[in-house]
Image: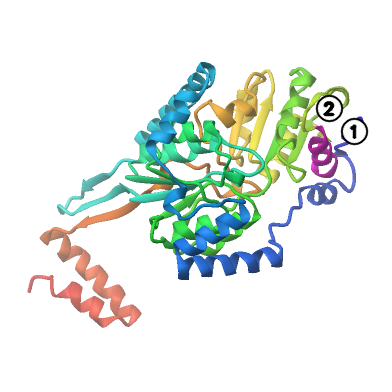
Amino acid sequence: MPFTARPLRLSTADSGFDAALQQRLHWSADTDAGIEQAVADILRDVQQRGDAAVLEYTNRFDAMQAASIPDLELKPAELKSAFDSLVAAQRHALEAAAERVRSYHVAQRKASGESWSYRDADGTLLGQKVTPLDRVGIYVPGGKAAYPSSVLMNAIPAQVAGVAEIIMVVPTPRGEKNPLVLAAAHVAGVTRAFTIGGAQAVGALAYGTQTVPRVDKVTGPGNAYVASAKRRVFGQVGIDMIAGPSEILVLADGSTPPDWVAMDLFSQAEHDELAQSILLCPDAGYIAQVQSAIDRMLDEMPRAEIIAKSLTGRGALIQTRSMEEACEISNRIAPEHLEIASHEPHRWEPLLRHAGAIFLGAFTSESLGDYCAGPNHVLPTSTTARFSSPLGVYDFQKRSSIIEVSEAGAQKLGAIAAELAYGEGLQAHARAAELRLKR
């Protein structure tokens, strides 16, 4: 049966454009009450019973028959064996992608992740000490699909940051282990790996069990149960973000082949029915060509049904008055992935303030960023790019302020601090400063 995809056609010249756009962008992050209750129960059980609870839920939800949690741990030799078992092309692609991701994050660490200090005129030392987290947990989805790229994108920046232990959890329904995921863990330097998933895996990482060590932060995407669990354990541990459906916005001036743009819209729509693909372009004729390309190529796609539902339910083809207006609307949307499909992308990039990742030029498909360009593919969604950043080395580091006040500095700063402390009614603060003053 042929599928049809009809993204919503909008024009900024329409009187109801703003309301129509807002309606199309709307996505509720509220979790089903049943999911919330189930997750709360699972986390409480894991916190109380540890390994026994994790084992029970893993065997139930993933149709496993493991006798203990140690049986679910993947040994380094098994990860290495999975890597060796890959065909040469897969091994090369995995290593090449890992090297590019590592190189990018090394540059990121050098740019923003070093400690620094200076002394002022009084000899007081002020600075910042940057240290890595001790242990992090990375969640890798393993249900409907396997994501070796997620292993690279979560583990490598943690490794580059200097994290001593990287604990990976990945569900393996019915015991089916994906060799590429295991090989990626080997290439990325994962310390320990467990074949557990769902809310119980998040709970094990957050609270620690008899076998799974407690971590300082949990990163990585998952289903609604995983997202709910991450939200609930935040405070016990750090988390990266609560990700919504995947998004792409293509800013086009009509110079890129319409087939390329249509396929880029497909690349996000194929994730799931809630994924969002939007085209902004001032050329009505070009928009029509993109729709024709969608019509022509859709049935060729193995995930055509998902793509059709995504584009029809959440997609949009929007005609703007100009490229400048398109940039303005893009900033309002703050997309996860932003492609500038233009022959002069550097002209428009300075106008764009909010996006998880910006892809410049016709040859820079978003899919290259997902796998091997180098920058991280864990990106803020659902307009959170207005205030959030991609996952990076900085997510696996913490900063401590360094203060060493000289005797001369204490005379100056002590008087200031005492005056402010008395004003706040905190006499002990004031006296602590005044005791250092010379009589």
**The magenta stretch spans residue 21:** no
Judge whether residue 327 can be spotted in this image.
no
Residue 160: image x %, image y %? 37, 36
Residue 413: image x %, image y %? 22, 64
Instruction: Report the amino acid beneath label 2.
Output: Leu
297 and 175: which is toward the camera: 175
Mark closest to the chain's N terminus, 2 or 1: 1
- Give the position of the C terminus as an image quadrant: bottom left
Residue 229: quarter of image? bottom right
Instruction: Report the amino acid beneath label 1.
Output: Thr
Instruction: Give the Cα distance between marks 2 and 1.
Output: 7 Å
In the displayed structure, 221 sits above or below 100; it is: below
Over which residues does the magenta segment extend? 304-317
The prevailing secondary structure element of the residues shown in magenta is helix
Crowd around label 2: few <14 · some 14–19 · many ≥20 (10 Å):
many
Kindly identify the residue that appears in the image at 64 percent across and 21 percent down.
361
Contact between labelled residues 1 and 2, with CB atoms less than 8 Å apart: yes
Q: Return the residue at label 2.
A: 298
Q: Which mark is residue 215?
A: none
Helix, strand or loop status at disc 2: helix
Q: Which mark is residue 4?
A: 1
